[in-house]
Amino acid sequence: MRSLTHTTAAAAGVLAAVASLLAAPPAVAAGPRDVTADVLADRDVTLGGDTVVTVPPGTTTYDGVFRGEGTLTVRGSGTLVLTKDSDFTLPESRQRVRTLGGNHPYVTVANPDPPAVTVERGATLQYGDGGTTGLIGHFPYNTPAFRLNQDNIRVDGTLRLSLTSAYNLGTISGSGLITQPRFLWGTWDVSGTHSFSGVIDNGTQLNAGRPEYATSLPNVRKVLNQGTWTVDTPLGRTVTMGMDFYQREYGSDINVQSRPGSKVILTGQYSWSDRGGDRDPSLSDPALNWTPARKNVNKRGTNIKGANVQWGDGITNRIFMPGTAETVYINLLAARSRSRLTFDYDGPVTLGAPIGGGVFHDTLAAPGAGDIVIAGTPGNDVTFAAVQYYDGSTTVEKGAVLRLGSGKRGGDGGLYTAGGHYKVVNDGSLVLRNTNRPLTLSRVGGSGSLTQSGAATTTLTGAAVTYTGTTTVSKGTLALRRGATLTRSRAIRLTAAGARLDTGPAGLHVATTLTGKGTVAGAVTNEGAVTTGLTVNGPYTQSSKGTLVLRGKPLKVTGTVRLAGDLDVSALGGRGRPAREVTVLDHRGDGRISGTFEGLRQGARLKLGDTTYRIDYRAGDGNDVALTAKTAPSPSPTAPEASASGAVAPRSAGASEDVGFGWWPYALGLALVVSLAVPVAARRGRGSRRAGRHAARARQ
């Protein structure tokens, strides 16, 4: 056992140690290490934790490097220029990202590390001085075809990328400015998902996605694009770019590429900028996008290279490329496959420039290699105010509207119809409203409607005009040539007196309905229903299947008239006090009318409300068709009459003819009724049960 002396000495030692601890001042946590002096002296810095550099006003060029583990914060009011590559990481305990093998086909960082580099507001950090070095990064990943930076950077001040190499910054956050000077020809690979909410100034080349990675920048406020912004995707990915793009100098463009099964959605607008500088580019007047500026400084472009691209997301009506052929260019190109461009807006937008397939601004040097879709989003109403030059199909989905021509001077539109892939699939509404330029369309199918509402003539050509929706002419002329017909159209309407349907040599075969108050130039064969009020500048033939529907004004015909089928007078049955004479057909041609309506030969009677009319095929100047009211009492019920009281168009069959037999048929009929009534009354007293059964059979 231990001695008492030893125990007492040990206890005294413990008490002394405790006393010394109580007498010592409390420990204070160490702050970030300030290495400003080392940086100003160009000494290399090894990080061992959080580190800060305070940059004095002006420009400080640092020829040293940072290494080790820790963080670097740049603050102050000046610019720190790094001329050599630095390699450091966060301490192991603060790293979240782990790569567990298999980075193919692409790498996505879903939960990035905290920032290793921070640029505070007011300070500027510059990577490089115009050469290939000066980047901060750590590259532990075996990523294919590009280098993925593990380090993340928060930019609340300014990060200037003065590098001519290809580089990756890692994950970016913050709300400041990241700027790449013009004409350096370096390439910035922006990979993964980034929370950065500031402004990106792209001076030369930025890759927002590649086959090896997808890019998401959901919070970026604006992009000042003064070079080439390229969007690409891995296989089977949809990438959305929601920011507004601006351009300040001539020569910038947006290139879009995608892989099979992928799509790129652009929901912002690519506009010119005449104010706001690098940090807040903006345009003082949206109309300036549509007006050429000096030296083409407001001309912007987009090249769609074998990609599936969508403008809009169905909840905006700001078109991605506002402008005309003088201020924007749009190219659809084939690369691995043909391109596809979809318009998806919730309100009216106008495309004022042609879509072609040339090289950059020489967009009309070749036809565009792709197809256009107008998405069926409610309210999606797209106007092509320029003649298009793509060789593919145009699809208008159900619920959408495509207008060719703005209806204003200088805004005429059209489609390129000479391409092997050309066709129009219209399941929505196709509206044709050029004011000066004639429009020609062929291969128009689908279940949608077609409306001619422009002063310039539209011509439909060829047997492939097969759409089944309603055809409306409200202004100008719609012409049919080279086998084009409207036999599949659900209805044909000429809604204005000046509306004109030119049927050409083949004439118009009406299989459904023809209504309105305009003019049909050419022969009309009616095997459906034609309403009066129209003018036919040509022959009119109504077959036994056809119906002429009487409205307030007559059908005017300048050519020969051949009649058969029905006359529907139901619409005049409830019009109040009837007219003394109703002209059905105003025949302005030579020769008499041939044929009659079914059951309505010359002089036949028919009843409209309480008024009885006779039909006359020699009315007016001797070859019109008219109904003339009778002044004599209404005929006996034994003479059936045509009635106009039915809600559904009644056929004209059953109307009687007045053949003039005098009074004796009525007297003979009365005597016959009396003679038959007496024996029946006499038999009622006997055999009532048997008579009841006979009566029942008679009523069946």
Image (cartoon, rainbow, N blue to C red):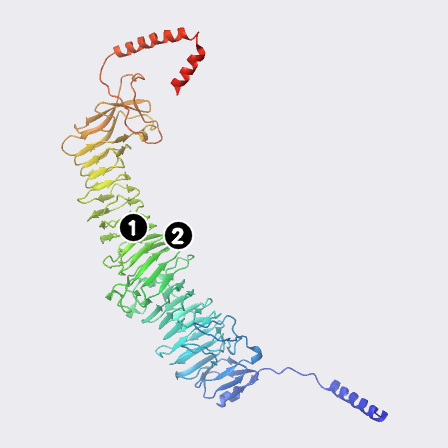
The answer to whether residue 219 is above or below residue 47 is above
Q: Quadrant of the N terminus?
A: bottom right
The label number, if any, that marks residue 44 in the structure image: none
Q: Which residue is rendered at x = 85% and y = 92% of the image?
A: 4
Q: x, y percentage for residue 449?
A: 32, 47
Q: Please, what secondary structure does the residue beneath circle 1 have?
A: strand
Q: Nearer the viewer, residue 359 or 675?
A: 675
Q: Which residue is rendered at x = 35% and y = 69% of the image?
A: 255
Q: x, y percentage for residue 273?
A: 37, 68
Q: Nearer the viewer, residue 252 or 102?
A: 102
> Residue under circle 2?
379
Q: How packed is label 1: few (under 14 Cα within 10 Å), some, or many (20 or more)? A: many
Picture quadrant where residue 269 is located: bottom left
Please say if the residues under marks 1 and 2 sit with CB atoms less than 8 Å apart. no
Q: How packed is label 2: few (under 14 Cα within 10 Å), some, or many (20 or more)? A: some
Q: x, y percentage for residue 19?
A: 77, 87
Residue found farthest to the right: 4
The answer to whether residue 614 is above or below residue 16 is above
Q: Mark 1 vs mark 2: which is more N-terminal?
A: 2
The three-letter code of the residue at mark 2 reads Gly
The answer to whether residue 62 is above or below residue 604 is below
Q: x, y percentage for residue 551?
A: 29, 33
Q: Marks 1/2: CA distance? A: 22 Å
Q: Nearer the viewer, residue 573 or 90?
A: 90
> Residue under circle 1?
445
Q: Nearer the viewer, mark 1 or mark 2?
A: 1
Q: Nearer the viewer, residue 130 or 673?
A: 673
Picture quadrant where residue 367 is located: bottom left
The three-letter code of the residue at mark 1 reads Gly
The answer to whether residue 240 is above or below residue 502 is below
Q: Please, what secondary structure does the residue beneath circle 2 have?
A: loop
Q: Which residue is rendered at x = 85% and y = 93% of the image?
A: 5
